[in-house]
Image (cartoon, rainbow, N blue to C red):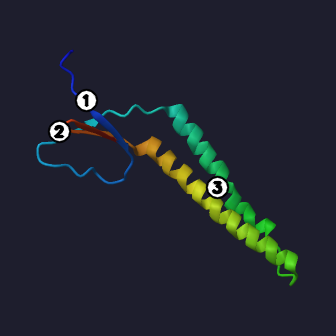
Amino acid sequence: MSDQTLVNIDGDFSLRPPAVQHGTRVRSLPFKRSFLVSLFMGAFFCAFCTTYFMSKEFMGGPEGNLFSLVTSLFLFFFMLAWSAGVSLLGMMFLGTLFGGETTCLSSGKLVIRK
């Protein structure tokens, strides 16, 4: 048997710095950025945001019938779900532009935080 120690790897995503204990080694790693990935994600983010500017065309005036009510409710909930997806895509885009990686090593546990 060789003298190897088991290290638990815990991948974690957070916007705040990791909570570390006394004696923990914290090191910021160089984050390799890809210009093409950032450009691709920025283009997708802009393309998916155009829906907000075009949604006024789909909303009709109040006609007072059931179809207009159902259409308005459907578009409201669709745009609500669309906003969740676009905000996630925006966070990923900003992460590729400004993000970094930090590792923390303490007592047999390695935490990699992006």
Q: Is residue 72 left or right of residue 16?
A: right
**Real-space Cα distance between discs 3 and 1?**
46 Å
What residue appears at the point 87 percent right and 82 percent down from the top-left corner?
Answer: 63
User: Mark 2 near mark 3, Cβ–Cβ under 8 Å?
Assistant: no
Q: Is residue 54 left or right of residue 25?
A: right
State which quadrant residue 87 falls in.
Answer: bottom right
Of pointers 3 and 1, the one earlier in the residue sequence: 1
Furthest residue toward bottom = 64
What residue appears at the point 83 percent right and 73 percent down from the top-left corner?
Answer: 60
Name the residue that disc number 3 marks: 49
Mark whose residue sits in front, 3 or 1: 1
Furthest residue toward top = 1
The amino acid on which the numbered mark 1 sits, given as a three-letter code, is: Leu
The amino acid on which the numbered mark 3 sits, given as a three-letter code, is: Cys
Position above or below: 36 against 76: above
Secondary element at tag 1:
loop
Looking at the picture, how far across and down is residue 77, in whole percent? 68, 67
* Label number found at residue 6: 1
Secondary element at tag 2:
loop
Looking at the picture, how far across and down is residue 42, in whole percent? 57, 44
What residue appears at the point 18 percent right and 19 percent down from the top-left corner?
Answer: 3
